[in-house]
Amino acid sequence: MKTELVKDWMTTRPVTASPDMALPEAHKLMKDRRIRRLPVVDAQGKLLGIVTRGDIRGAEPSEATSLSIFEINYLLAKLTLERIMTKNPVTVTPDISIGEAARVMLQKKIAGLPVIENGKVIGIITESDIFRMVVGAWEKEDK
């Protein structure tokens, strides 16, 4: 695992969003694409922040609200990712080892890291990618 590199296991060309994307649109995008984290980038692809499914859920109103569905929808449509994203997220480069990326995730208690090269998002490495690598290595040993 120490010799495996992030660039060989990351998801390339990850789904990204702009900071002015509305929360309901981001929620739908994440649900439709079956992803749990969404890097937020500017027009040049530079990382500005990241939004997770938990961030989206935390920004949605409680079921105990006294607002009408119309008021809720109006307010949510005005809420943009720029307001709820985690700014300056922890990132990695494509040439670090999977072991190092896993160590960073463990230390920071995060499940995914945007992969940055020349200031732009080129991928994302997640716990799932690391599990896929470990299971693949384990299956090779069993054969």
Image (cartoon, grey):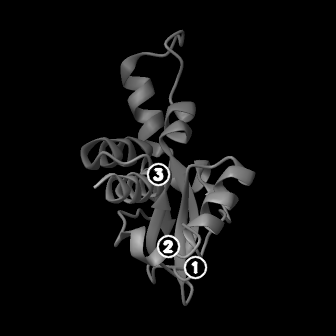
Residue at the spot of label 2: 6
The residue furthest left is: 32
Q: Badge 1 local density, few (<14 within 10 Å), some, or many (20+)?
A: many
Residue at the spot of label 3: 37
Would you say the residues marked 2 and 1 are in contact, meaning their CB atoms lie under 8 Å apart?
yes
Which amino acid type is marked by label 1? Answer: Thr
Would you say the residues marked 2 and 3 are in contact, meaning their CB atoms lie under 8 Å apart?
no
The label nearer to you, 1 versus 3, is 1
Residue 16 percent coordinates (x, y) = 40, 64
Residue at the spot of label 1: 93
Mark 3, secondary structure of its residue:
strand
Depicted 109 relative to depicted 62: above or below: below
Which amino acid type is marked by label 3? Answer: Arg
Depicted 8 relative to depicted 133: above or below: below
Quarter of the image with the N terminus is bottom right
Whether residue 125 can be seen here: yes
Q: Residue at x 54, y 78 (%)?
A: 116
Which amino acid type is marked by label 2? Answer: Val
Residue 85 percent coordinates (x, y) = 59, 53
Residue 34 percent coordinates (x, y) = 30, 45
Mark 2, secondary structure of its residue:
helix
Q: Badge 2 local density, few (<14 within 10 Å), some, or many (20+)?
A: many
Would you say the residues marked 1 and 3 are in contact, meaning their CB atoms lie under 8 Å apart?
no
